[in-house]
């Protein structure tokens, strides 16, 4: 009789553990989704940075589309090109930072008034870009970074699925 009680007790514990394990959320699914989203964002920023302008620009002016869009506040062109690289099921906010201060630049609808509310899980992609300080006074980012005399900025893409 004691042997049967022991077997019953052990099987009850084992079935309880299996049941609890099935109920718990899988972190593998979330990690796979976020890593795919991170790869999409990193590729989009890298492609925009490495893609050269097709319009003529002055000597010394950066030829990178990403840098050009930021300097000239071309939110619509940035979002249009980003949408060619990022699926429409992904929403995003773009922030620009100088290392000590970060400011909202635009969202996935090319709006500059407010960032879109995030939905978990949020994934962040980064791109470091050089911008000559001589070009910044013509840009919207001059006001929040007016005292900054450096030339290194970080573009942050905060992304999530709709």
Image (cartoon, rainbow, N blue to C red):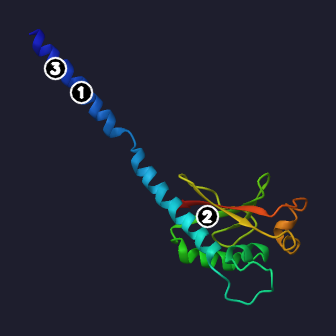
Q: Indicate the quadrant where residue 157 lies.
A: bottom right
**Residue highlighted by disc 2:** 92
Q: Marks 1/2: CA distance?
A: 44 Å
Determine which of the numbered discs, if any, sits on residue 14 in the image: 1
Q: CA distance from mark 3 to mark 1?
A: 10 Å
- What residue does disc 3 label? 8
Query: Which mark is nearer the camera, 3 or 2?
Result: 2
Check disc 2 and report its element: helix, strand or loop. Answer: strand
Of callouts 3 and 2, the N-terminal one? 3
Circles 3 and 2 in contact, beta carbons < 8 Å? no
- SS assignment at label 1: helix
Q: Residues within 10 Å of mark 3 (few under 14, many from 20)?
A: few
In the picture as drawn, the residue positioned furthest to the right comes out as: 147
Residue 137: x percent and y percent?
88, 71
Residue beneath the point at 75% across and 78% down: 62
In percent of width and height, residue 59 lies at 80, 85
13 sits to left or right of 90: left
Q: Nearer the viewer, mark 3 or mark 1?
A: 1
Question: From mark 3 to mark 2, how far is it between C-alphas?
Answer: 54 Å
């Amino acid at each position: 009789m004691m042997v049967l009680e022991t077997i019953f007790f052990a099987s009850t514990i084992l079935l309880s553990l299996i049941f609890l394990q099935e109920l718990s959320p899988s972190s593998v699914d979330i990690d796979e989704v976020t890593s795919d989203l991170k790869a999409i964002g990193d590729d989009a920023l890298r492609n925009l940075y490495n893609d050269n302008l097709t319009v003529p620009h002055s000597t010394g002016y950066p030829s990178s589309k990403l840098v050009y869009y930021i300097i000239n506040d071309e939110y619509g062109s940035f979002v249009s090109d980003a949408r060619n690289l990022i699926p429409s099921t992904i929403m995003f906010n773009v922030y620009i930072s100088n290392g000590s201060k970060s400011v909202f630049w635009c969202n996935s609808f090319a709006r500059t008034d407010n960032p879109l509310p995030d939905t978990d899980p949020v994934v962040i992609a980064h791109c470091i870009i050089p911008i000559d300080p001589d070009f910044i006074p013509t840009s919207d980012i001059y006001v929040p970074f007016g005292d900054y005399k450096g030339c290194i900025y970080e573009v942050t893409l905060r992304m999530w699925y709709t």
